[in-house]
Amino acid sequence: MMKPYSKAGLVLAMLATLAYLPLRASAGLLDDDEARKAILDLRAKVDAISNTLNARLDAKADKTAMLDVISQHDQTQQQIAILRGQIEVLANDLATAQKRQKDLYTDLDARLHKLEPVQVNIDGKEAAVGQNEQSAYDGALNTFKSGDYKTAATQLDAFVKQYPQSGYAANAQYWLGNAFYALRDCKGAIAAQQVVVKNYPDSPKAADAMLNMASCYTELKDKARAQKTLQTLVATYPDSSAAQTAKDRLPKR
């Protein structure tokens, strides 16, 4: 298989052929020296033309290569611009996500802080009370103060069941007994106040609970239990204001 010629090779071949034809036509007219000289001159001319042609082809190739480089450069710049735009979008999305996450953590921290117990003074004693716990107790007590004793009884009963270890448990149980008493339910009132005395004997409300029990027994015409309750109150909590009231109610000896 014949090897294909380049443009430069084809031109050289044509020049060589053109140079060879007049040389053959005049060979018989020239002697050996003149023929050799003519051949050398033609070869020099062919070499000069070949060099010029190759130089022009190389220059053209360099220009084409340069145009290719410039085109590739432009394409690369366009791709870089697109990537920069995508980076800006991603950076903006990341900043937005980080802000949302920070806001979420701030909100969560605030909520957790609200749920954290705080120290409060209840009847002279320090106790840790949660925000929901405090709100539930205050709500029930405000309902009682408003005169809605039935709703107050429901709220106070729910409180002591949900927060049996609360610092407000003894007070809530005491006010539950008072709510029953206000509803003229003496049996319910006595049962509620007995829980105060039994479960929270160290509470300042225990003496008052016993005094209320004695009042309920009196209304129920149970004078014996009323008197016994007053005597137990004086003996158990002698220094309380409730004990002084109990002494005044007891028969004088």
Image (tube, rainbow, N blue to C red):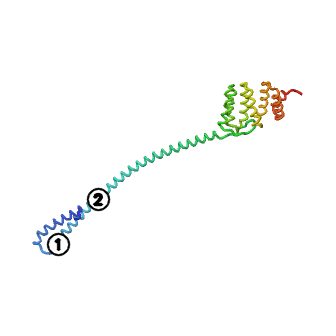
Tell me if label 1 and label 2 are in contact, CB under 8 Å: no
Image location of residue 253, percent across then percent down: 89, 28
Residue 102, quarter of the rendered image = top right
Quick check: 248 left or right of 42?
right
73 or 37, which is in the foreground? Answer: 73
Camera-side residue of 27 and 143: 143
Would residue 28 appear left or right of 185 to someone viewing this image? left
Query: Residue 190 — which label?
Result: none
Tell me the amino acid under the disc marked 2: Ala
The amino acid beneath tag 1 is Lys
Taking the spot 81% from the left edge, 33% from the top edge, the residue there is: 240
User: Disc 2 on helix, strand or loop?
Assistant: helix
Residue 238 is drawn in which quadrant? top right
Identify the residue position indicated by label 2 in the image: 61
Q: Position of residue 242 (x, y in %)?
A: 80, 31
Camera-side residue of 185 and 16? 185
Crowd tier of the residue under label 2, counting other residues whose Cα lies within 10 Å: few below 14, some 14–19, many 20 or above: few
Point out the tag, 1 or 2, that comes first from the N-terminus.
1
Q: Tell me the quadrant of the picture where the N terminus can be found.
A: bottom left
For mark 1, what is the residue? Answer: 37
Asked whether, in this view, residue 110 is left or right of residue 167, the answer is left
Q: Position of residue 209 (x, y in %)?
A: 77, 31
Which residue is at the far bottom? Answer: 32
Q: Nearer the viewer, residue 91 or 97?
A: 97
CA gap, disc 1 and disc 2? 36 Å
Q: Nearer the viewer, mark 1 or mark 2?
A: 2
Q: Residue at x 40, y 50 (%)?
A: 80
Question: Left or right: where does residue 155 sit relative to residue 71?
Answer: right
Vertical position of residue 250 compared to residue 48: above or below: above
